[in-house]
Image: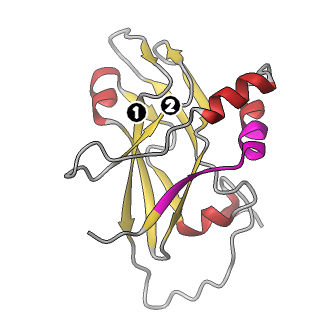
Amino acid sequence: MIRVGKFEKVSFEQFAKDYKDCFNNASDEEIRRIYDDIKLPRRATKGSAGYDIYSPIDFSLQPGEQIKFPTGIRARMNEDWVLCIFPRSSWGFKFRLQMNNTVGIIDSDYYYSDNEGHIFHRLTNDSKEGKTFQIEKGVAITQGIFMPYGITEDDDVQEIRNGGLGSTTKK
């Protein structure tokens, strides 16, 4: 296997800022406990392609509800690789849990952005059977798979990222 990257926590300061942006009533003590308990992504088995990404919080979603939260992690990877994030297949199968952007795309240069490359999740319970989705802190919620990518022969992009989510389209 080729080793192409590494998961790390973002700084506590970045996590606290982003957490307060999502949950403005959180105390500093609560945020510190959540941050200290963040688990870095890991593969469950030797044959797993995906790295399980664990929920840093307990939450519950009724059908049609959504949640946005910071994971506390970032991914450093080799150039010409991308990290694709998908819901765990069992959650999609049982609850139609979906990522609001369908597949999360984490570019190799996102690691260097102003927000430290902080990976967020926005999830929706799209259950048609009226099932409530409930997750406990520390349980695998999504999975990340590293993949190589190519570019066109006439590609001449020289722009450098300077920002977080959606920053490649901001001019």
Considering depth in this image, is 167 or 60 the residue closer to the camera?
60
Q: Is residue 81 above or below residue 41?
A: below
Query: Quick check: marks 2 and 1 in contact, CB under 8 Å?
Result: yes
Q: How crowded is mark 1: few (under 14 residues within 10 Å), some or many (20 or more)?
A: many
Q: Which of 2 and 20 is in front in this view?
A: 2
What residue sits 28% from the left and 42% below the top? Answer: 44
Query: Is 103 placed left or right of 66 in the picture?
Result: left
Q: N-terminal of the two: label 2 or label 1?
A: 2
Helix or strand or loop: what does disc 1 sit on? Answer: strand
**Split into 4 quadrants, where in the image is the C terminus?**
bottom right
Numbered tag placed on residue 105 in the rendering = none
Amino acid marked by disc 2: Ser
Compared to residue 119, the image places residue 82 above or below, namely below
Say which quarter of the image contains residue 97.
top left
Q: How far apart are marks 2 and 1 (CA)?
A: 6 Å
Locate the N terminus by quadrant: bottom left
Badge 2 density bin: few <14, some 14–19, many ≥20, Cα 10 Å: many
Q: Name the residue under label 1.
A: 140
Where does the image place residue 95, in percent across and percent down from the top left? 34, 21
Q: In the image, what residue occupies the spot 32% across and 47% down? A: 43
Which residues fall within the magenta stretch? 6-18
- Is 64 situated above or below 81? above
User: Circle 2 is placed at which residue position?
Assistant: 55
Taking 141 as reference, is 163 left or right? right
x and y percentages locating residue 159 in the rendered image: 68, 79
In the displayed structure, does residue 150 sit left or right of residue 124? left
| Residue type, label 1 | Ala
Residue 11 forms part of the magenta stretch: yes
Task: Tell me which corner region of the image, top left, top right, bottom left or bottom right, holds residue 3.
Answer: bottom left
